[in-house]
């Protein structure tokens, strides 16, 4: 039996990325879990003016961290994780708009 061929050399290496960023992705998942319990799963997708609002939230968390506040007082999770979560929301909104 000959060995098979899988042409995936140019595809994203999601597994390697997840291994390299396991801690960061878990922190972002904690932000998602906190928000999901506070609001609802997927509710961020239907927020009016979502791109502008998630951009503003991303910058607010980044500025809080830069001002020396490591954790968000409301969630007790790192501002950096909130910043990343909002950046992911923005990116998904932009990608979804390209598909419309």
Image (cartoon, grey):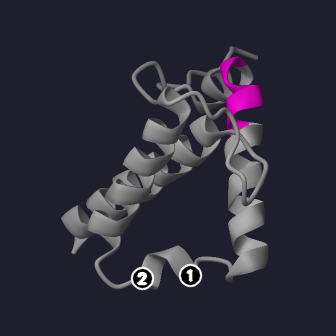
Examine the image and state in which quarter residue 96 appears.
bottom left
**How many C-alpha atoms fall within 10 Å of the one at disc 2: few (<14), some, or many (≥20)?**
few
**How many C-alpha atoms fall within 10 Å of the one at disc 1: few (<14), some, or many (≥20)?**
few
**Where residue 77 appears, x then y in whole percent?**
75, 46
**Where residue 19 appears, x then y in whole percent?**
73, 22
Identify whether 33 is placed above or below 12.
below
Marks 1 and 2 sit apart, C-alpha to C-alpha, by 7 Å
Q: Which residue is mark 1?
A: 43
Residue plotted at (69% across, 31% down): 24
Q: Which residue is mark 2?
A: 47
**Where residue 95 appears, x then y in whole percent?**
30, 58
Q: 9 or 83: nearer the eye? A: 83
Q: Are marks 1 and 2 in contact (CB under 8 Å)?
A: yes
Residue 61 is tagged as none
The answer to whether residue 6 is left or right of residue 71 is left
The magenta region covers: 20-25
Which structural element holds mark 2?
Answer: loop
């Amino acid at each position: 039996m000959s060995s098979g061929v899988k042409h995936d050399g140019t595809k994203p290496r999601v597994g390697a990325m997840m291994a390299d960023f396991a801690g960061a992705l878990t922190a972002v998942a904690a932000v998602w879990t906190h928000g999901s319990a506070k609001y609802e799963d997927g509710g961020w997708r239907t927020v009016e003016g979502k791109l502008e609002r998630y951009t503003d939230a991303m910058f607010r968390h980044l500025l809080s961290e830069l001002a020396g506040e490591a954790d968000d007082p409301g969630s007790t999770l790192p501002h950096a994780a909130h910043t990343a979560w909002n950046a992911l929301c923005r990116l998904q909104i932009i990608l979804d708009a390209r598909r419309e």
